Image (spheres, coloured by chain):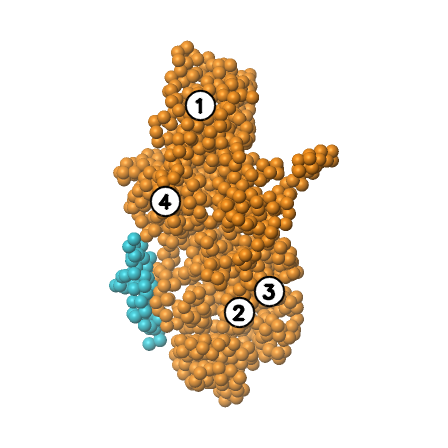
Amino acid sequence: MAEPRFLVVRNDEEQYSIWSADRDLPAGWHDAGFAGSREECLAHVDTVWTDMRPRSVREANS
Amino acid sequence: MSQEWTFPASFAQERVWMANQLDPGSPVFNVSSPWLFPAGIDVDAATDIVNQVVARHESLRTHLRVDDGALVQVVQAHVPVPLPADDLSGLPRADYLERLAEFRAELARTPIPLDEPPLWRARLVRNPDGLVALLFVVHHAVFDSHSAVLFIQEVAAFSEAALTGAPAAVPELPIQYADFAVWQRGQLTGVELDRQLAFWVDHLTGAPPVTGLPLDRPRPAQLDFAGDEVRFDLPAGLLDRVGGLAAGASATPYMVLLAGFAALLSRISGDTDVVVGVSTAGRESQELASLIGMFVNPVALRCDVSGDPTFRELLDRVRDGLLNAMEHGQTPFQEIVEAVDPQRDPSVQPIFQTALNFIPDSGLDPVELGTTKDDLAFDITTEESRLVYRTGLFDRSTAEAIVDRYVRLLDAVVADPDRPVGALPLLADADRNRVLVTWNDTAHEVPPSTVVDEVQRQAAATPDATALVCDGVPLTYAELNTAANRLARLLVSRGAGPETRVALALPRSFELVVAILAVLKSGAAYVPVDTAYPANRIAYLLEDAEPTLVVAAPETAALVPGEALVLDGEVGADQSDVDLTDADRRAPLRPEHPAYVLYTSGSTGRPKGVVVEHRAATAYLAWARHTYPGLTGTALLHSPISFDLTVTGLLGPLTAGGTVRLAALDDDGAWVGGRPAFLKVTPSHLPLLEPELSPTTDLVIGGEALTGEQLAGWRAAHPDVAVINEYGPTEATVGCVAARIAPGEPVVAGPVPIGAPTWNMRALLLDAALQPVPPGVVGDLYVAGAQLARGYHRRPGLTAERFLPCPYGPPGERMYATGDLARWRADGTLEYLGRRDEQVKVRGMRIELGEIEAALLAHPDVRAAAAAVRVDSGEPVLVGYLVGPAAEESVRAELARELPAHLVPAALVRLDALPLTPNGKLDRAALPAPASTAPAEGSYLPPRTAAEALVAEVYAEILQVEKVGALDDFFALGGNSLRGMRAMARIRAEVDVELPMRALFSSPVVADLAAQIEERIAAELDGLSDTEVAALLAAEEESS
């Protein structure tokens, strides 16, 4: 059996998550351009999601 | 007495006989085969016709008997018998039909003893048209569904012959059933049997021993046949479409129905390895085709539903699996059970618990027997179909919901077989709307704000009210607020501000509460550091949290590695005591900024900091103030602030005008000022709760699963207080689902529901495919809405893993995967069913610790209880812990009565009190190992009574064991049910007492079985007159 594939996804607040590649992505979420096993996707999130403040908070602060 | 011949019983007869022993008084094996004779056949002719069929088939003249420990079939010579007949031809049609239904039901529901010939019952009825109807009911031990077809064919043929005078068109019978049985016994033996068993052992190794289907009730300790059925019609044309899909996939319609059933079971249970029972006709050779008799052999079909296959892929797997299984369909099922040796458990049917039959041509029996063999079994026909279910496990509403879902699933797969199983719709639109919308209708206007705004609003409104009491000393809102303002200004000057953190290493004190408010006012998030924690844990936490500042008290400063701001009474004294504005802060404070970071331990990995924003905290507090009127009074704050349960009792009163009394439950200070209005505890605190500390308005219970048994004692003493069961992970801010038990409302035993989502929160119960599960079905609990935390501090990967895109909310919303299991009750409240990752198993059986704890607590002399699975000796062992004076033997007896065998702890440990964590939860890690989980090797206890000696002797002989003691277990010594049958026959022969087979399954230990025998002898003696007893004893004397 093939290992299930996941996507790294992101919403408009630039919060990251992962999603099964076979499933329709819920509204308001976008493919962040990385696919792989669950572990690979989570490791990728660890490298790209460096500022965990929601975008609206980040922009209001700057 | 007529002439008779004995032959070995067939494997199928043996299996039916054994199953029948579980409850010989049940009609579960009755098969009905009704028939209406054509015009011109009167009662005498009909009697003659039935007798001709009986004369042709030895099976209809066969009964079963145990001869010398072996089951034999006894065939009697044919002697024509009269049939009871009733003339109902004079009745109006409606009355006739009513009487006929009564006759039919009575005949069908009367058990047929297997040891008294014949094993069938017949009754003739003349109907208002003058025709003769035959009611015929026969025991499954000598009859199967193909036999029913043959029986009707022969009755029809003899009727035709009687009318025309021609010879009956019935096939010659070259052999009889007993010939088959003898041949089968010779055939399925030795190497051939071993070869077949090897296939099955291989096929079934690793299969789940019991289905993971969610049950409405725990399994009763002993399996029985009590059942019911839901009858339904498949939608018009569905079976045709099933046939169409089958034809295009080189499969049979049955395979499509089976694959659909496997998909349904997998979706409902979450199991990806599903075992379903199917029947083989068992009539491979031509000579058997025309024989009435019991040939059917069940076969276990193991379906691999892993990897979320499309339905078409699953159908391929089921087809291949079924063909493979059918090739080995002759292996006697009983032998497979013994060879595979699944966990012996009298509460579970071995190997498979669900079944599906496709009987397109034969309709269902009109009489519902109120029995079942399986937990769930579908009988699908072209006319009416049914789902038969075990009433000990399922409610009718659950069975109906299963039927609905099965039909919906079949409808969907025939329309689009390329959909993944995980995406198949199981819910009706109305149900879907109910669970997603109606039961989550929590919208409530709560303007976004910060905790700071809320507390300052209260301080301005009631400056002179008492905000805080510590050691009997009060502090007003104005005093608290100004003290916090001074410290906040100092913190700002030291770098604290929005999106930074300040760690608080402070004991329970005024300073702690002042510091919390000061940190919030500065705009930073507070990070509580429990000063009772080990140094390593404190060091880890301070490193991980990256605080801008650490605040400590003089006595705790040494616990903090590095520099700390020590509150010595002088600190901040020179600062202004006016409320801070954004102009005073390093950046404006918004509701989206974090208010606190709480560290929680997962079951795996290092503690992680949950970042909770002001908006989430104020959302929760708004709901809490509305729900807990006691927050305007005094709240006793006793647990550490590192535990988010404490947020309610601290920030709740301070935003509601109430008073916080700081004291541990065992502090004298806790009592000063009388009973509090509000108290929040964990269930483990309940036995410690003194009457003087019990709240007058609201008792909120959170942090752990709560049962009615745990609550009963406190509730009985305080019927006038509202009890709220609050559920919520830290990641969804304190409490996000809650159930209120109003004053006076009764508390029922079993799990207390956790209720409904709080304001602006939604609870989603989803299956593995993230599809909503129907009411009553166990699902993974996800929560979404206003109280969701931002995530885990500095853990983006972990945050992404647990905070997922929500398919059922506004665009871009996240939902938190709680890792908890729950189900919707019919009233729209949630029932908590434990952690998914704490689903413990012992020898493959799923263990519900809560159920064992509830059973322990049900004992009147048990005050507190816990259960745990321990692996001290390598093998997992179930251990029960109890507090109270209850005698171990009486507890053990109680558990054995209440729980299935696999849930009865192997060891009981008595404790003075249950160990608790600092947060007041049960400290599972601190539960001690039992002294010994089983009688040590070699602890041989010689039989103590005559009955024990007898049982021990029989065990020793049947099992070829040298020495059997009073505490030895039949099955542990290597017994199986076939040997059990022999053992019971031997015992019955020795003591001449009615001892059913089930006695051995429920009491396999020598001493227990001996006690049962003595009980039964005593009961029989009770039924005798004194003279009879004297005569009996005299006879004993003579024979000895």
Q: Provide the residue designation for mark 2.
A: B917
Q: Nearer the viewer, mark 1 or mark 4?
A: 4
User: Mark 1 falls within which chain?
Assistant: B
At x 52%, y 39%, the residue is: B982
The picture quadrant where one finds residue B416 is: top left
The residue carrying pointer 4 sits among few (fewer than 14), some (14 to 19) or many (20 or more) residues within 10 Å by Cα, namely: some
State the residue in front, B847 or B802. B847
Q: Residues within 10 Å of mark 3 (few under 14, many from 20)?
A: some
Image coordinates for residue B286, horizontal then vertical, percent: 34, 27
Inspect the image, locate mark 4, and give the three-letter code of the amino acid beneath it. Ala
Q: Is residue B970 left or right of residue B208?
A: right
Task: Mark 3 or mark 4: name the one nearer the start of the chain.
Answer: 4
Whole-angstrom CA distance, mark 3 to mark 4, is 48 Å
> CB under 8 Å between callouts 2 and 3?
no
Q: Which mark is residue B911?
A: 3
Marks 1 and 4 on same chain = yes
Q: Position of residue B220 (x, y in %)?
A: 54, 47
Q: In terms of secondary structure, where does tag 3 sit?
A: loop
Identity, as a three-letter code, of the amino acid under mark 1: His
Q: Colour of chain B?
A: orange
Q: Colour of chain A?
A: cyan
Q: Which residue is mark 1?
A: B57
Dot 3 amino acid type: Leu
Residue under label 4: B198
Distance, label 2 to label 4, CA atoms, is: 51 Å
Q: What is the three-letter code of the residue carrying label 2?
A: Thr
